[in-house]
Amino acid sequence: MSPGITSHTKPRQGTQSPAPPLPENGSAVFRRFRLFDEESAALDEVSPQTEALPPFAHALPWVALVSLMFLLIYLARAIFGPLLPAIEQEFGISHAASTRFLLYLSIGFSVSTFLSGYVSSKIRPRIMVGGSLILSGLVLLAISTAASLPLLTILFIALGLSSGQYFNGGLSTMRSLVPLSQWSKAISIHEFGPNISFFLAPLLAGVGVSMFGWRGVSTGMGWLTIGGGLLFLLIAKGGEYPSAPLSFGGFTKALKEPKLWLFTWLVGLGIAGEFAPFSVLTLHMIDERSLSPELTALLLSTSRIAAPIAVLGGGFVTTRFGVRRTLYACLVVYALGMFCMAMPWFPIFTLGLFVQPVLTAMIFPPVFTFLAESFPLRDQPMYLSIGMPLAAFMGAGLMPSILGIWGDLASFSAGFAMMGCLVALSLPLLRLMSDEKGR
């Protein structure tokens, strides 16, 4: 079982159900971009049988295109971590106040991701992906012109709302391209997106702020994201079928499932490890460690170079040793990395800076494998719609905000130590998983 999004029934073996009929007078443009499936109520009869898809190599270019869209939509949010010092300076606000923008962004993102389960049953996934990027780009253009803190607050919430529609749409599109047996490979490629964005964001912010200011960086990201969305709508393949509608009965049943909350917590820890330290490290290294902005950008970018490779390693290690053992090892080293980042001695801090993101990146393949092994394929959109908003709010909103408060009250180093304790205290929860040994 794999963490797919598109639901399936049991069509005849070796057959692929035809797509819903188009109007006879429909143009090629209408065929390409129509939003709604007139027969979504009979979704199970029109969903393709993905196990009959051609080999993974044939789908690789289109999976890579989806990953590129994930890179752009993630970069549109991640770019603001390195931009916080410039925003603080312009508006004269504290660390806690600036990181609160990330909390607002996360609130919008979480609400949108929750609603995407319903939206994905009404709108084709490919349209969700392209539309999410285009709307996010427009919000980024608006952020670049915002002149007041209340307006910035509204726009950060809007950026979260627009970008939150990507996740369900992106995974649904990939699921329509890749057989179940190749899903772990697709997930590993998809996870290249956010990990590369964490490498690019400090470089783009560092160079961009020095040349164009933070508003210029937001403008450039806006046009780049809009261009990516239009490109996807024009050339992408897959994502033609909405998912099954969510039911109230299934929703309430899911809330009583302990494995859902374990999945949510683990994903939240993974997102927190990726996003929270990254969001405040620029402030920490410049203000508390007295590093130059140039050296800060260089260290922050190079510390993320190995993360994309680690994602692939996470998939291999999970297959070899199993979900529980892989997660245990990753969480132990993740916690140690956070403790190292809290140390005053710079070489130990640098060791943690490079180790922590690598082990965080390795968390996601086993966590999504856990989801795949725990729940039926057709129910996974519902579990994702419940779990991902909470995980995103925890990891990309609440935790960066807490680190910002620590930065004002004590130090960011104390916040890093707090995160290390939180990860270490989560290790006993892995007992809820089966003690499989992998393949």
Image (cartoon, grey):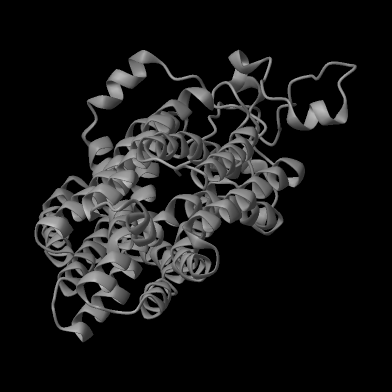
224 in relation to 331, above or below: above
- The residue under the point 49% across, 61% down is 213
Please tell me whether residue 33 is drawn above or below residue 226 in the rendered image.
Answer: above
Question: Which sits in the foreground, 424 or 45?
Answer: 424
User: Which quarter of the rendered picture does the C terminus lie within?
Assistant: bottom left
Left or right position of 333 against 171 = left
Front position in the image: 238 or 36? 36
User: Where residue 14 sits: x, y (%)?
Assistant: 69, 36
Q: Residue at x 81, y 20 (%)?
A: 22
* Number of marks in picture: 0
Specify whether 417 is left or right of 281. Answer: left
Residue 19 placement (x, y as % from top left): 74, 26
Residue 191 image point, x, y percent: 47, 57
Quadrant in the picture for residue 261: top left
Q: Residue 329 sits in which quadrant?
A: bottom left
Is 331 displayed left or right of 51 in the figure? left
Relative horizontal placement of residue 275, taking residue 289 as reference (left or right): right
Residue at x-position 63% and y-position 35%: 49
Residue 172 showing in the rendered view: yes
Q: Where is 396 relative to 104, above or below?
A: below
Name the foreground residue: 40 vs 340: 340
Residue at the limit of the structure toward the bottom, as seen here:
347
**Residue 140 point in image, percent of width and height:** 53, 45
Quadrant in which residue 330 is drawn: bottom left
- The N terminus lies in which quarter of the figure? top left
183 or 358, nearer to the observer: 358
* Residue ID at (41%, 69%): 307
Decide if residue 376 is in sight here: no
